[in-house]
Amino acid sequence: MEITITDAAKDYLNTKLVPGDRVFLALDDGSSKYSKLGGTCAIGNKFQLVIADAPDSDYAEALTNNTDLDLTTGALELSYLGHGLALDYRNGSLNLHDDSGILDGAVTIGFAQPLAADEQARREEMRALGGKVC
């Protein structure tokens, strides 16, 4: 899959990343292991850029881009991304859109961090509840 990164987004990312950083485009709606949210009904409309030290086999789908950014995503995320995918920076926020419109007007960026034990327990509880919430 291809993604266009606008000059404005590239300039912003250059203030956050160092050359060689590995970046994952991940959902941030409670469904991703990198998501800081949980139990949300906003499935598929929250994204984040996750900076990681090592590859992650769950995020091995390459996102070909017009910069030298090492950007990948996961198979689950691909189901929400369409033709004309682009990342832009305007009004102080990264926004992700495709030909269907805006996918997320406030894409966050942060470092991959292991989940705390209480967070892992909360996620397991949410998984067990499944379709009983929302």
Image (cartoon, rainbow, N blue to C red):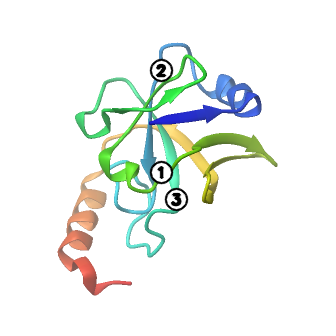
Q: Which of these two is toward me, 13 or 104?
A: 104
Taking the spot 51% from the left edge, 52% from the top edge, the residue there is: 47
Residue positioned most to the left: 128
Mark 3 or mark 1: name the one nearer the start of the chain.
Answer: 3
Secondary structure of the residue carrying tag 3 is loop
Within 10 angstroms of label 1, few (less than 14), some, or many (20 or more) residues?
Answer: many
How far is disc 2 from disc 3 in space, using C-alphas? Answer: 22 Å
Q: Which of these two is toward me, 22 or 103?
A: 103
Residue 117 in sight from this viewpoint = yes
Whole-percent x and y of residue 24? 43, 36
What amino acid type is highlighted by mark number 3? Lys
Whole-percent x and y of residue 23? 46, 30
Above-or-below relation of 53 to 114: above
Residue on which the image places disc 3: 46
Q: In the picture, which quadrant includes the C terminus?
A: bottom left
What amino acid type is highlighted by mark number 2? Asp
Quadrant in the picture for residue 87: top right
Residue on which the image places disc 1: 81
Taking the spot 58% from the left edge, 23% from the top edge, the residue there is: 17
Q: Which numbered dot is residue 98?
A: none
Mark 2 or mark 3: name the one nearer the start of the chain.
Answer: 2
Q: Which numbered dot is residue 21?
A: 2
Question: Along the horizontal axis of the image, is 49 left or right of 114?
Answer: right
